[in-house]
Image (tube, rainbow, N blue to C red):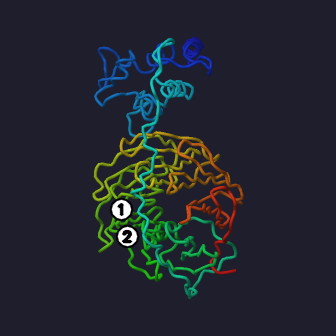
Amino acid sequence: MSIVTRIILLSVLSAAFVRAEEPRNFEDHILPLLREHCANCHRPGKTRGGLDVTTMEKLEKGGSAGPSIVAGIAENSPLFRAISHIGDEEAMPPEQDKLPPQILAAFKTWIESGLKPNATGKARETRAVVQLTVDTATLGAPKAAPDFIRSLPPLANAPKLVRALPVMALAANPWAPVIAVGGHHETVLHDLTDGHRIGALPFAEGEVRVLRFSRNGQVLLVGGGSPTASGKVQLIELKTGKLLTTVGEDFDVVLAADLSPDQSLVATAGPEKLVRVYRVADGALVWSMKKHADFITSLDFSPDGKQLASADRAGGIFISEAATGKNPRLLAGSTEAVNQLTWRSDARSLAAACGDGQTLLYDPATARLVAKWPAHEGGVLSIAYSREGRLLTGGHDATACLWDETGKQISQLKNCHTAAFRVAFTSTQHILVGDWSGTVREWTPEGKELRSISNHSAPP
C-alpha cells in the first residue's frame, strides 16, 4: 500500500471514528463506512441480493432475505453478522477478511444504541423481547421425592488412582438429595442428606463425560466412552442402581447427551460433529443431523420436550424439532466455543456458556439473542438455571457466580482451587461446583459453604 493510499485511508477512518463518548449515528459515522466497504455491491442500480446500503430507509428494509439491521443486540442484525463473519450469513465484503475491529465496534455501538439516524434524530427502543417470568405450571414437581438407592457394594475392579480426577461430569437430582460425579469407568453417587458416599456405578465403556438426571428424578443418564473408538449412553434406575438399557452406537466418545422429558428419546453427540437421536424403547436411531462445524459440546432437550438445542466448539448453536430433527435454526451471536447450554424451566429462554467469557441468553421463539454479559475471565465452562430463573455459571477464573437474568451478579463463590468446571443446583436449590482439582463443593445461594466432597475412585 502506497503512502498516499495510507494517508487517504487514515483520513476516511478519522472522519468515521469520533471520540468514544460521542453517540454514533447513520449519517455521520455509518454511511461513510458503508460507502467505503459495501456500496460497490449494494447501491442503486447494483443491489446484490436486493440490498441497497446507501440510505437508512433502504438499509432497514434490507434485501431478499428481509431486514438487514435490527435495533438492540448487534448480533441479531444480519448486516453485522455478515461483516463480522458470524453464523451462516454470507461474509461481507466477499472473499476478504472481516473488517477491522474499530469498524465493527462502530457498527456495534450504532446498532445497540438504537440506530440513531443523524445527530439530532431519535434512537429506537432496544428492550429485550424475551419473557422473563417463569411459568410455574411447567415445573412438574412430583408429589413425593423419588426413591434412590442408599448403598452400593464396592466395585470388583475399582480403579486405583493416586489423586482425585477432575470433575468432568456432575449432576444433581432435581427432587431428591442425591448427586452423581463422573469418574474413570464409574459414576459415584453421594447422599446430600448427610454427605455420605453411596457408592459407584460401573461404566465399562470408558470415561464418564456426561451425567443427567431425568426430569422426574427417577433415571440417571451416564454418557461417555473411549476417544476415537466408541461412545455409549446408559440409563440407570436410581431406586435400585440397576442398568435399564444401553443406547447409542457412536464411533467416538460421547461428549454431550440428554434424555427427553418423556424419557422416550436419547440424544448423543461428540467429536463426530453429528447429533444422533435414539429411541429408548428399542435403541433404534430416529434421526441424525450434521450441521455443526466442530466437536459438539452440549445437548439439551427443552423442558416441554418439543425442541433439542445443540452447541459446538466453533460457536454454533442450533435448535431442532426434538421428534424429527426438522427445521434446525441457527442461533447467531457466539464467536467462540460454546461449552454448555441450559433451558429455563418454562422453555422460554436458552442460556449459553461461552469460551470468550460471555453468558448469552436467547429467545427460542424468535431465535434472537436477547441478553449477554461478561461472566468469567478466561471463559465460562458451565451453566445452569435454577427453578426460579436464576443462572449459575462456573469459569476458568476458579469462581462460580449466581446471576439474575439481567446479568446482575447476586453472589460469587471463590473457594475453588482450580477452574470451576461443572455447576448444578441441588433439589433444595443449593449450589454445587465441581472443579479441576476433583472437589465438589456445596454452597447456599448466599455463598455459605456447607461441605466439600473429593472425587476419589474409592472412599478415603
With respect to residue 350, does 82 lie above or below?
above
What residue appears at the point 46 percent right and 61 percent down from the top-left corner?
256
With respect to residue 254, does 66 lie above or below?
above
| Most foreground residue, 65 or 226 | 65
Residue type highlighted by circle 1: Arg
Identify the residue under disc 1.
276
Q: Which mark is residue 248?
A: 2
Circles 1 and 2, Cβ within 8 Å, touching? The answer is: yes
Secondary structure at badge 1 equals strand
Which badge, 1 or 2, comes first in the chain's sequence? 2
What residue appears at the point 64 percent right and 80 percent down from the top-left corner?
458
Residue 280 appears anywhere in the view: yes
Secondary structure at badge 2 equals strand
Where is residue 39 shown, x and y percent of the image? 39, 18
Left or right: 162 as drawn, with respect to 238: right
View extreme (front): residue: 143
| Most foreground residue, 55 or 408 | 408
Where is residue 361 shown, x and y percent of the image? 48, 44
Q: How would you rate the neighbour count of disc 2 (Cα within 10 Å): few for under 14, some for 14-19, many for 20 or more?
A: many
Say which quadrant the C terminus sits in.
bottom right
| Most foreground residue, 336 or 329 | 329
